[in-house]
Image: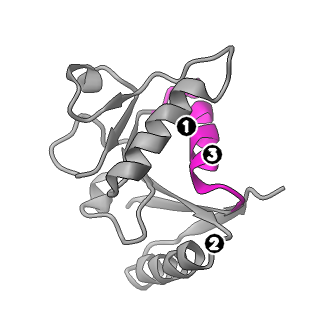
Amino acid sequence: MTKVLFLHGASDRLAAAARWLTEATVTRRTVLVYAPREETAERLDRLLWTQAATSFVAHARADSPLAVESPIVITCDIGALPHDQVLLNLGDEVPPNFARFEELVEVVSGDDEVRLSARERFKFYRERGYAPESRDIGA
């Protein structure tokens, strides 16, 4: 069964996602980032290129020929993609086909809209027999 983890309390959802992705690469995890809105995918792509002057987080967009080799793939559409280890959801809905992944990570900011939709997803997972965990990443 998919492990579900909510990271809440982020002051900036995308910056927190970028930090988490940096940590994921250190532990050699492969991650599919689901960003259903194109502007979110673009902003995260730029963040991963520029977040630290001394490091680079290897990643690719799903339509890149490098997606098959990249540990992190950013997509607006979950389909037949190369990774099924970890799904990072940056959408406000339950991601399609999330159960095919070993782990699902949800990053939640203090923004009311993001927080309220995250509560609904938490409830959705719990009602279907998942045991969502939560971790405060604020401060």
State how many labels appear. 3
Question: What's the magenta region?
Answer: 10-29
Relative depth, front residue between 90 and 32: 90
> Residue beneath label 2, please?
111
User: Where is residue 132 shown, x and y percent of the image?
Assistant: 54, 69
> Residue beneath label 3, please?
15
Say what amino acid the circle numbered 2 marks.
Asp
Say what amino acid the circle numbered 1 marks.
Leu
Category of crowding for the residue at label 3, using alpha-carbon neighbours closer than 10 angstroms: few (below 14), some (14–19), many (at least 20): some
The Cα–Cα distance between marks 3 and 1, rounded to whole angstroms, is 10 Å
User: Where is residue 123 shown, x and y percent of the image?
Assistant: 48, 83
Category of crowding for the residue at label 1, using alpha-carbon neighbours closer than 10 angstroms: few (below 14), some (14–19), many (at least 20): many
> Residue beneath label 1, please?
21
Say what amino acid the circle numbered 3 marks.
Ala
User: Where is residue 120 shown, x and y percent of the image?
Assistant: 47, 83
The Cα–Cα distance between marks 2 and 1, rounded to whole angstroms, is 21 Å
User: Where is residue 110 shown, x and y percent of the image?
Assistant: 68, 70
Q: Residue furthest right?
A: 139
